Amino acid sequence: MRLKQLLADGRLRPHRPSRREMQERLSVVDRNLRDAKVDGISDDLKHQTAYGAAFVLATMVLSASGHRTVGEGHHWVTFEVLPDLLGETLGVWPSTSIKRGVNGTALNTILSATYPERMPVNF
């Protein structure tokens, strides 16, 4: 399990995000996704902007799961641990379904921080 190893290696530390922190991150995601759709910018810049949104979302999942990265390679660590936090079958992994469990808790925490009117989300 990647999560246990990254914790043991000191690459992850405990973290309790605030509602404000999660809301601010989600506004960055919204902004980046809007910016990535702007006509007239290069495909490379669109990709960088969309990647930024994906990284912030992944960081939100990590935070909602009670962790934060430490040191160099924080992008790699953030994406490396996602299968453990969300389940191996999330989207980019072999299947398109989302497993119940930690992922449901993490995603509900993220969504409820900004979209309480859309809650609860059932997985």
Image: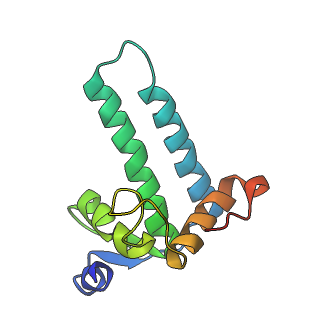
- Residue ID at (53%, 69%): 64
Residue drawn at the location 56% of the way across and 48% of the way down: 26
- Quarter of image, res 78: bottom left
| Residue under the image location 48 percent in, 35 percent down | 33
- Residue 63 to residue 51: above or below: below
Residue farthest toward the right in the current orientation of the protein? 117
Q: Residue furthest top?
A: 40
Quadrant (top left, top right, bottom left, bottom right) of the N terminus = bottom left
Q: Quadrant of the C terminus?
A: bottom right
x and y, in percent, of residue 16 in the image: 53, 74
Display colour scheme: rainbow
Q: How many numbered discs? A: 0
In the rendered image, residue 46, in percent from the top left (x then y), is placed at: 34, 28
Q: Is 59 on the left or on the right of 73, as rendered?
A: right
Q: Horizontal and vertical percent for residue 114? A: 67, 53
Q: Is 6 situated left or right of 30 in this image?
A: left
Please tell me which residue lies in front, 26 or 16.
Answer: 26
Decide: is 47 above or below 120: above
120 left or right of 90 in image: right
Q: Is residue 123 left or right of residue 83?
A: right
The residue closer to the viewer here, 13 or 111, is 111
Q: Position of residue 89 (x, y in %)?
A: 39, 68
Q: Is residue 76 above or below residue 103?
A: above
